[in-house]
Image (cartoon, coloured by chain):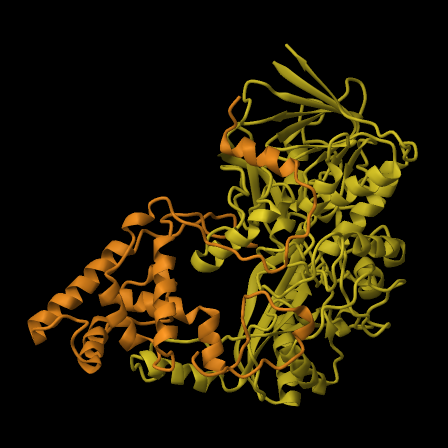
Amino acid sequence: MRRVIESDICIIGSGITAAMVAEKIAEERNASIVVVEAGDRAVPLERRQSTRARFLAYGENPWPGDHVDGHTADGIQSRSMCVGGMAMHWGGVTPRFSPEDFRLKSLYGVHEDWPLTYDQLEPFFVEAERRMGVAGEQGPPDLDPRSAPFPLPPIPLSWNLKLLKAWVEKSGIPFWSQPSAKNSVPFGNRPACCRNDTCSPICPIGAKYSPDFTWNALTGAGSKVQLLTRTLVRRLVPADGSDRIELATASSPDSPDSPVELRARTFVIACGYLWSPHLLLLSASSRYPEGLANRSGLVGKYMTGHRSVQVFVKVPMKLYPGINVHHSLVSKRYMRPGRLTRYLRHDLRVWESASGAEPRLRDDQGNLLLGDEMLADWRARAASGRARMRAYYDVLPDRDSGITLHASARNAWGDPLPDLVFRDSSISRELRGWSEQQLRERFESIVRAGGGEILQAASNRFQDHPVGGCRMGADPAASVCDEWGRTHDHENLFVVGAPTCVSGSCANGTLTFAALSLRSASQIGDAFPPAAQAGAAARQTVTA
Amino acid sequence: MSLDRRSFLRNATAALPVVALPACAPGSAGTSASSGARTLDPALLRAVADVTLPSELDASARERAVTEFERWLTEFTPVAERDHGYGTGDLTYTGPDPAPGWRAQLEALDLESKQRFARGLAEIGTGERQRMVRAQLRRERGPLPGPAEAQHVALGLIAWWSMTPQATDLCYRARIGRETCRPLDRTGDEPAPLGQGA
């Protein structure tokens, strides 16, 4: 038995970029939309207090069942496959990429320019902030350019962050409240943040935006958006004699003998940096032996992220760790550095911390501490405040940084799994040691100005907030999709969000991924009539 | 037509409107299906708590701490999937049930006390009791473990208490209320001093 589902638009994946695309098109266009998610629904809001309680008490996963068994990659990745995707776990931090990110070649002579500018993306940054409900403080306009105020007032600085702001700004570097998709006031039928301190991995009250809220609002009875869960899309299939994608084939563990066939006028791949190129590579055929959208040979290539240097600092003030641990100060001073003789751009963030001032079982002399001794030792070490500072710096990717199909590892359906390897470009390899030394010196300079002591410094090998794999560009020989996410090779196939990025910046990427997706949605929607009163609906048939 | 659990949750979720829950709705860690046997001798556990938790916890605060620790142990689920954060595809699981080992350790302490002092652990003085516990922990090194990973019941109790918001408040002598629901508009205030009877 084969199940056929027809729609105007088929979106593969249900994370934050899929939610942005579906919501915008559903509002603005008369088009039926089917969203296909390999994983299950996430724990509903009503149960999040309980799963959070078990996370705090026992370290248990607060999102039980948020992955598909056996469907993973060989290499560093973040494992989450459920309705809402990785944005069910995210910390809700929403800086923008800076104007310089889009012009690295022109401004600094490194890597490549994007095929669009910050100014072209700016209205979609504003839209993404509005849709998610971003609380933020306008930074110095030269460092934090924006055309509209944040939709929500900033998350107020805690007692700790107010003191740390005065301390860190003795360095002459301006800091302000990190923008976040967390309600500073009730918004979107969700309450204001009440500092539960577990933003990542779970907000128990829904004050932090996550895509499930969008899906709950979009997929009610009679909606033109249909969400299909536990359905893994395994191939995209072009039409005979045409480069247009005709259908997607999918499988569900709930009905393994009944393949699902998804037919649509437009297909949107919104599966993140890892699974988007993976699907294109999996869809190889005799007509497309290297996979779909891959005439450039660049599907799965040029993946990157940002690495970090982090320090823990003893600061000369009394702080109270735990007032609002996930909120931070941010500065973009060094994201917008002007002329550079050697390329280094980075953000700066400051958090409260308890590092180095936790309770312990033995003192420095090795004496066992019980009861009052343990409390006295803890108090002595907690008498001076602690802060954490971190700088993300961007890593420019090598062409062969990314995924290939694994030679032997297969999922439950027998499909090859991704083999993921990040590789720096030659310039990033050459600059790495120097860059990290510069950042350590930056932190030392800040601590000298404010007073204090660096207790611990570490460089992180992990490349955070990965991007690429289906990068955009004007030249079809050097990119997978155009500036709208439309693949060069298939006019009705789009890739949205992180995979389309040319570079990864030095700040959390989610807001930029959302803005890029909304810009793609504006192009995808152009093929459909403006929204009418009566919504289109997906059609489903079952055939033998 | 019967619904399995997964189908029920899926259907139930789909039917729910977007609602704003009360911001501070209490959360419960729930109860493990096999929690019945996951208990320790109450008197012996309290005898250990007397010499491992700070004396600034008055009798009622200490009793609350021990009772909460007992509840924590009761609701522990062995080999549950742990949180998996950014940057790893690996799934890891909580460890085995610590209760049998901990129960045996308490019984051993009690037996040792009877051998040494002809009285049970709960009847001997706190000085002797603490020396016995110290002897048990003499090989423990490194940072405090996660409570369920503690090799000794005394260490499990200390580790559990240390991670509570109440312990942080006691250390800083302030009402910080870490990881509890607190109004956002009070975030800029210095936490109030801790009152008496922590």
Q: Nearer the viewer, residue A458 or A512?
A: A512
Query: Residue B11: image x %, image y %?
Result: 61, 33
Q: Depth check: A318 or A345 in front?
A: A318
- Residue drawn where x is 29% and y is 79% of the image: A368
Picture coordinates of residue A398, whole percent (x, y): 67, 52
Write down the quadrant of residue B163 in the picture. Answer: bottom left
- Residue A356 visible in rendering: no
| Rendered location of residue A119, percent (x, y) | 89, 58
Quarter of the image for residue B42 reads bottom left
* Residue A281 horizontal/vertical position (percent): 65, 34
The answer to whether residue A309 is left or right of residue A515 is left
Residue A530 visible in the displayed image: yes
Residue displayed at 66% across by 74% down? B186
Quadrant including the C terminus of chain B: bottom left
Q: In terms of image quadrants, where is residue A342?
A: bottom right
**Residue at far top of view:** A544
Q: Name the colour assigned to chain A in the rendering.
A: yellow
Q: Residue at x 35, y 64 (%)?
A: B67
In the image: residue A197, left or right of residue A349? left
**Letter of the chain shown orange in the rendering:** B
Against A373, is A523 above or below? above
Image mark count: 0
Q: Is residue B31 above or below residue A238?
A: below
